[in-house]
Image (tube, rainbow, N blue to C red):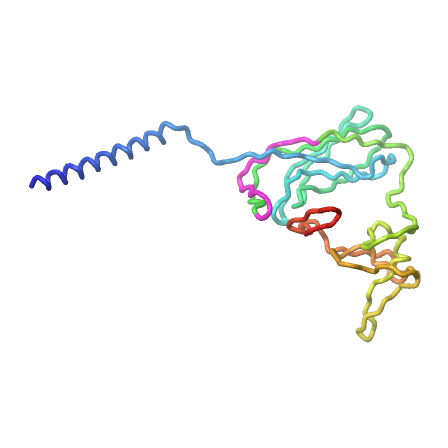
Amino acid sequence: MKKTKELDYCKTKISTIAIISVLAISAIFVTLPAATAQESRTTYSFLGAVPNPVGVGQTVLFHVGIFENLATVNQGWEDLSITIERPDGETDTIDNIRTDATGGTGVVYTPTMTGTYYCQAHFPEQVLKWNIGGLFSALIPAGTIMLASESEVLELVVQEESIPYYPGQPLPSEYWTRPIDPQLREWSAVSGSWLWADSRGAYAVTGNDEAPETAHILWAKPLTWGGQAGGTSMGDWTFSHGDAYEGKWDSRIIINGILVY
């Protein structure tokens, strides 16, 4: 009988302690202010102009955005703007800019007078709609507040004389390697090693009439596809596998002039 009473007393005491603990925890939650899990993130706006300097009346391409890419090609940052203070003191504004998924995009502007224009990009605060990152970079969850930011002021110099948009480049006078930059259009005359299928389905080299006659290395170890196709029959056609959304390697380092990847 005595043992039964002691057991009942212990059970009652344990129950009382549990109830008091629950009430104490509840009181803590009641007295603490409600906290939000929403995070904020600093952004960094950028603005570039090509060409700069430029001739009056010529079109300038602005590259505008922030250094934060998005997850898929149909996503973009919204409502960016560019303010442009003209030499006469008036201000032009390009607004309602939506970036590509890379975080940036291009918009055009045509200056109408000579002088120095002061240009600045503006990124408005907005809430991230999608998760981004998480594979090779830190995850930024949906709902994060992307804080407003402004780029550095860019000086755009506008001169009276027009400039060539697409100037030519002379042929190489010394050792050169592939891939050949697609902008070197004139080099197609000496770079004809493009494979082309003939009517029989076999592969043949075309347009190779101006290829170097001395011993030379055609290729060693390919790292990427792209560059100038070359050859007189192909002209200045170029090709590329693209690199807007995918880098070359997960990791890489150069040790003593040797690329390790």
Q: Please indicate whether residue 16 sits to the left or right of residue 166 in the image.
A: left
In depth, the one of 161 and 242 nearer the eye is 242
In depth, the one of 199 and 188 nearer the eye is 188
Give the residues drawn in magenta, as a range: 135-151
- Residue 173 vertical position relative to residue 113 in the rendered view, above or below: below
- Residue 258 vertical position relative to residue 58 in the rendered view, above or below: below
Q: Please indicate whether residue 259 sits to the left or right of residue 70 in the image.
A: right
Image coordinates of residue 22 in percent, x first then y, are 29, 35
Q: Quadrant of residue 106?
A: top right
Q: Quadrant of residue 189?
A: bottom right
In depth, the one of 34 and 74 nearer the eye is 34
Give the residue displayed 83% in from the left and 63% down from the top. 194
Image coordinates of residue 165 in percent, x first then y, are 86, 43
- Residue 108 vertical position relative to residue 240 in the rendered view, above or below: above
Image coordinates of residue 255 in percent, x first then y, are 71, 46
Q: Is residue 130 magenta?
A: no
Q: Is residue 139 magenta?
A: yes
Number of numbered discs visible in the structure rendering: 0
Image coordinates of residue 195 in percent, x first then y, are 82, 65
- Judged by its main secondary structure, the magenta piece is loop
Give the residue displayed 10% in from the left and 41% down from the top. 3
